Image (tube, rainbow, N blue to C red):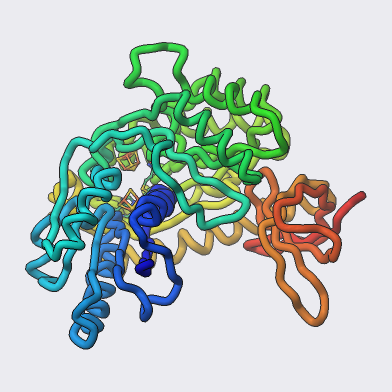
Amino acid sequence: MKKLYIETLGCQMNKSDSERIAGILSQYDYSETNNEKEADLLIINTCSIRQLSADKAYSQLGVWGKMKKTKPNIKIGICGCVAQQDKENIRKRAPYVDLIFGTHNIYELPELIAKLEKGEKICSITTKPVIKNQNDFKIIRKDSVNAWIPIIEGCNNFCTYCVVPFTRGRERSRNPQEIIMEAQNVINEGFKEITLLGQNVDSYGKDFNNPDITLANLLRALNKLEGEFRVRFVTSYPSDITDDLINAVDECEKVCKYFHIPMQSGNSRILKEMNRRYTKEQYYEIVNKIRQRFEGVTITSDFIAGFPSETEEEFQDTLNAIEELELDYSNTAAYSPREFTKAGKMTDKFIPENIKYERLERLNEKNKEACLKSNKKFVGKTLKVLVEGKTEKDGKIILNSRADNNKIVHFEADKYNIGDFIMVKITRAQTWCLYGEPVE
Ligand code: SAH
Ligand code: SF4
Ligand code: F3S
């Protein structure tokens, strides 16, 4: 067998894609290795959400290009969002690349690999997906407790800063039966957590012309499957969260009471400039509605600092939102101009780098405070956790786990295993994690 090494950058969708790529290639005589030095085929699955992520892809190719000078038989591949965007142009910067394939071309890999074996140089990028029933292909999952299941790919929202609609195309929902079958398979295989993935999970089913196919009903169907497991879904678009979805989360005991709802900015003018379809007030309403409905629910968000034209006062609204809404955690980033996007062309309104990064620093400080405050709320409470890993420290076994509400919980115990669900009483809170002890 030949050896395959995949490096994965970017979001969970890329992680899931890499598991599928490794699975397909395993059916064509490639086994995965963690050691790039012994690989026959090296693939980088790339992200272009910010310039920094795209730069990482090219610097990795550079390293592999040098490797190829001493080992000319190795093959180098690139896929994911940078590949979809830069296409054949990748070879201008990295002429030694053998295989380029886009985000829509993963299921075409059997044909592409056959050509690669014949020594052909390949670039396969389409704007329409090569559709196949994904269940016909093997998946090699990286995690032993969590299984990623993509339910909708692409995005129709065209937020003015974002490259995703250009790299992932228009929204396409997977057939519900196909998703349920994949979920049943992972439960049978012993996975304890299913994370439903989509750039915009609330849009699930809209392209089917059948009002019964919704995320809410998908959750209800998954909840009926037998076995001990839990279900999460990411990412939600604020104004697309329906009452029916909230009801479904409430009804379904296997669905985690956790929402990831990126706000992006706490200021309504900036939200409008971003082409987000909600105001600050509407976002506050949805968060309050969810908080009132579920006790102990966690709500996480994403924010961008220094969007073109953002004033200091408008940035303050973002800091205030984190505090006022008591957001449990937020991903943060400084605005990065992207090719093809509307905001990327607003060059006269760009915020100077030093101001942007100074705002990002304050945003991170605020996020840290909010996380600690959120974690402290759970001290004294008992949470249901799923054990994800074990570490040994000073002769003691520490279990690393995650609560239903997505909080990381560490506790000492020697009788439990990875994949066990346990009730843990929280005794101590730090900024990024909780500590506790198991309750019988
Ligand atoms: N579909 C999700 C997010 C996908 S991208 C949503 O609608 O929220 C993940 C995050 O990257 C975004 O939430 C945003 O905060 C950030 N991001 C996207 N484009 C960016 C850019 N040009 N500069 C900085 N951050 C960006
Ligand atoms: Fe990007 Fe907006 Fe789509 Fe999210 S909803 S992927 S931020 S365009
Ligand atoms: Fe990055 Fe593409 Fe995901 S741009 S964030 S890998 S959809």
Numbered marks: total? 0
93 up-or-down from 66: above or below: above
68 up-or-down from 365: above or below: below
Direction from residue 316 to residue 74 in the image, left or right: left
Q: In which quarter of the image is the N terminus?
A: bottom left
Q: Residue at x 57, y 39 (%)?
A: 232
Residue 321, horizontal then vertical, whole percent: 50, 44
Direction from residue 372 to residue 10 in the image, left or right: left
Residue 2, horizontal then vertical, whole percent: 35, 68
Direction from residue 84 to residue 204 in the image, left or right: right
Residue 219, horizontal then vertical, whole percent: 57, 26
Residue 335, horizontal then vertical, whole percent: 30, 56
Which residue occupies the foreground of this view, 276 or 152? 152
Direction from residue 355 to residue 364 in the image, left or right: right
Q: Which residue is drawn at 54% across and 42% down?
A: 195
- Can the viewer see residue 315 in this picture? no
Q: Residue furthest bottom?
A: 70
Q: Residue at x 36, y 28 (%)?
A: 173
Q: In which quarter of the image is residue 10?
A: bottom left
- Can the viewer see residue 45 in this picture? yes
Q: Residue at x 30, y 54 (%)?
A: 49
Which residue occupies the foreground of this view, 226 or 201? 226
